[in-house]
Amino acid sequence: MARPLPRWYLVPLRVLVVTFLCALLGFALSLLLGILGVVVRGRIRGIHPNLTSAYRHVAIPAAAAISAVVLVAMSVFEIQRYRQVRALRKVEEASR
């Protein structure tokens, strides 16, 4: 039984879903590291740490950079994958 050709409209959907998930993960990890850095800096200087700077100056820019990189990389990977699967399915169809 022949498998259907891949759907072109699923490529941007997969790219956006993976980009969103990687952005969330990047935001969470950079926020954790930012909070730890701000707390350590506050302890060293002997001041009360301002944790909003972890959001503004660490987590949001890091998540934006991660999102941009993942969006470009996933777009390239998914387009290559779509073309490869489409070509292989056509070869499979032609060999029957």
Image: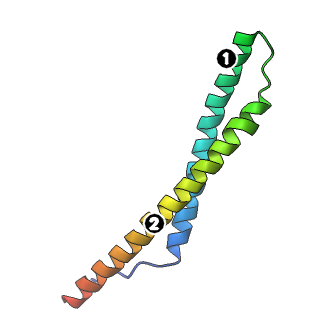
Q: Residue at x 57, y 60 (%)?
A: 17
Secondary element type, mark 2: helix
**Image quarter for residue 85?**
bottom left
> Compared to 48, does 32 lie above or below?
below
Q: Count of labels shown?
A: 2
Q: Residue furthest left?
A: 95
Q: Residues within 10 Å of mark 2 (few under 14, many from 20)?
A: few
- Drawn side of residue 24 relative to residue 15, left or right: right
Q: Residue at x 38, y 82 (%)?
A: 5
- Where the N terminus falls, by quadrant? bottom left
Three-letter code for the amino acid on which mark 2 is drawn = Val
> Compared to 62, does 14 lie above or below?
below
> Compared to 13, does 24 lie above or below?
above
- Where the C terminus falls, by quadrant? bottom left
Could you say where residue 46 lies in the image, as x and y percent from the top left?
A: 77, 9
Could you say where residue 21 lies in the image, as x and y percent from the top left?
A: 57, 52
- Drawn side of residue 64 relative to residue 80, left or right: right
Q: Earlier in the sequence, mark 1 or mark 2?
A: 1
Which residue does the numbered mark 2 point to in the structure image? 76
Q: Residue furthest front?
A: 45
Rendered image: mark on residue 27: none
Secondary element type, mark 1: helix
Three-letter code for the amino acid on which mark 1 is drawn = Val
How far apart marks 1 and 2 lie (CA) works out to: 40 Å
Could you say where residue 52 lies in the image, as x and y percent from the top left?
A: 79, 32
**Image quarter for residue 40?**
top right
Which residue does the numbered mark 1 point to in the structure image? 40
Q: Are marks 1 and 2 in contact (CB under 8 Å)?
A: no
Q: Residues within 10 Å of mark 1 (few under 14, many from 20)?
A: few
Q: Residue at x 23, y 90 (%)?
A: 94
